[in-house]
Amino acid sequence: MNRRHLRFFAALSAAVFPLTSAAADALSTGAWSGYAAADARLFPEAGLYTDQRQAFVGFSAQPEYYTAWDGDNQSLTVTGFARLDLQDETRSHLDLRELVWRITRDDWQLKAGISRVFWGVTESRHLVDVINQTDAVEGLDGEDKLGQAMANLALYSDWGTLNLFWLPDFRERTFPGEEGRLRPALPVDMAQARYQSAAGRHHQDFAARWTHAFDIDALEAGLDVGVSHFQGTSRTPGYVAFVDDGGRITLAPYYDQISQTGLDLQLTTDAWLWKLEAITQDAKTADRHTEAVGGFEYTFVGVMESDADVGLISEYLFDDRGDSSPQPFDNDVMIGARVTLNDVQSTEFIVGGIVDLESHSTVLSVEGSRRIGESWKLSIEGRAYANIDAADPLYPWRREHVLSIEMARYF
């Protein structure tokens, strides 16, 4: 947590967090949980760039403290995270994922502090998930997020839930070091980050999301709807090339100001899940564009008279910028399967691939986990790249096939 986070939380706490005797008692009776893990990342092929390694060993820990009082209507959650990478020191980092106070009343809830929020329903991409910055040196799927300073007011009514967000401090994206893998073709100097707004990382961002669940009797289905809007600093950086003091061409992250409106839908009927995420985004330095991902998941329950469930997944990914898009999934199809054994070890895994319908560039993925005993969990995650076209944004990653193995001890 940096000084700005401390000042923000201290001021906010002084204004809205009266530490009653009940709260003080609760602080001494809270519960700790979390995990500590060791992991390895293995790259079977040598990297494209000098000094890149093929094996990485690391350790991580995520302790969490939770306490509640006022009949569970108020709570405090503190979640820290630490990563030590023995080969890529740039991957080593500390983060305060959560330091958030919550108060709930009949028709509203307020959260204040540092927290994480997830929006989205689809499997292959989460277009509408725009609140938190991606911790890009963690998991391979981009779903690990940095803590974000915020105040979040949720209003509950018969017409749905309206969440309002004030996001006063921006988090810059993390990047692997020069010896690391899964990095851009040129090294990134995070210290040279640049902003479209003169306010830089202190630009005040705002967001709102309305959600509601409808029953559709004619289809015997349920429809979950989310409509969101974000105004502020883009969590996805562009890049500006410059010559550093050593005479090398280096990239500086560039964070534009954007206005993004999103829609997410999930229709549930029997064994079918139909999903859609779509956004339209206008940036200060780029034309408005539209992205979408949508598809279905069909689950076979109790396959071959066993306890196992198998879900078949297919999604289409679209970006109206086409080949000029800085991201690789502009006209692609994802096909995958989710297997849940429903055993006492909670064994589950998902395999899939995304294929570009024009260039046939292909990304294959596998993720799985299984509990061992009462406290241990083994997780694997892998990616492989095939037929990557030279014009594809993934071309610098064409040798970045990777298998990650993690053993975690939960407490």
Image (cartoon, rainbow, N blue to C red):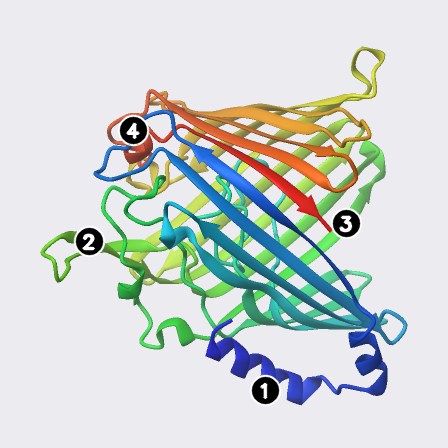
- Residue 186 image offset from top left, x and y in percent: 23, 46
| Mark before the other along the chain sequence, 1 or 4 | 1
Q: Residue at x 28, y 25 (%)?
A: 389
Residue 46's mark? 4
Marks 3, 1: nearer the viewer: 1
Q: Amino acid at mark 4?
A: Ala
Q: Are marks 4 and 2 in contact (CB under 8 Å)?
A: no
- Per the model, the C-alpha gap separating discs 2 and 1 is 38 Å
| Mark before the other along the chain sequence, 2 or 1 | 1
Looking at the image, residue 288 sits to the left or right of residue 108; the answer is left
Residue 11's mark? 1
Disc 2 target residue: 250
Looking at the image, residue 319 sits to the left or right of residue 366; the answer is left
Along the line of sight, the residue nearer the viewer: 366 or 290: 366
- Per the model, the C-alpha gap separating discs 1 and 4 is 50 Å
Q: Residues within 10 Å of mark 1 (few under 14, many from 20)?
A: few
For residue 27, above or below residue 58:
below
Q: Residues within 10 Å of mark 3 (few under 14, many from 20)?
A: some
Q: Quadrant of residue 208?
A: bottom right
- Residue 307 image offset from top left, x and y in percent: 83, 21
- Per the model, the C-alpha gap separating discs 3 and 1 is 36 Å
Residue 213's mark? 3
| Mark before the other along the chain sequence, 2 or 3 | 3
In the structure shown, which secondary structural element does the residue marked by tag 1 occupy?
helix
Q: Residues within 10 Å of mark 2 (few under 14, many from 20)?
A: some
Along the line of sight, the residue nearer the viewer: 141 or 280: 141
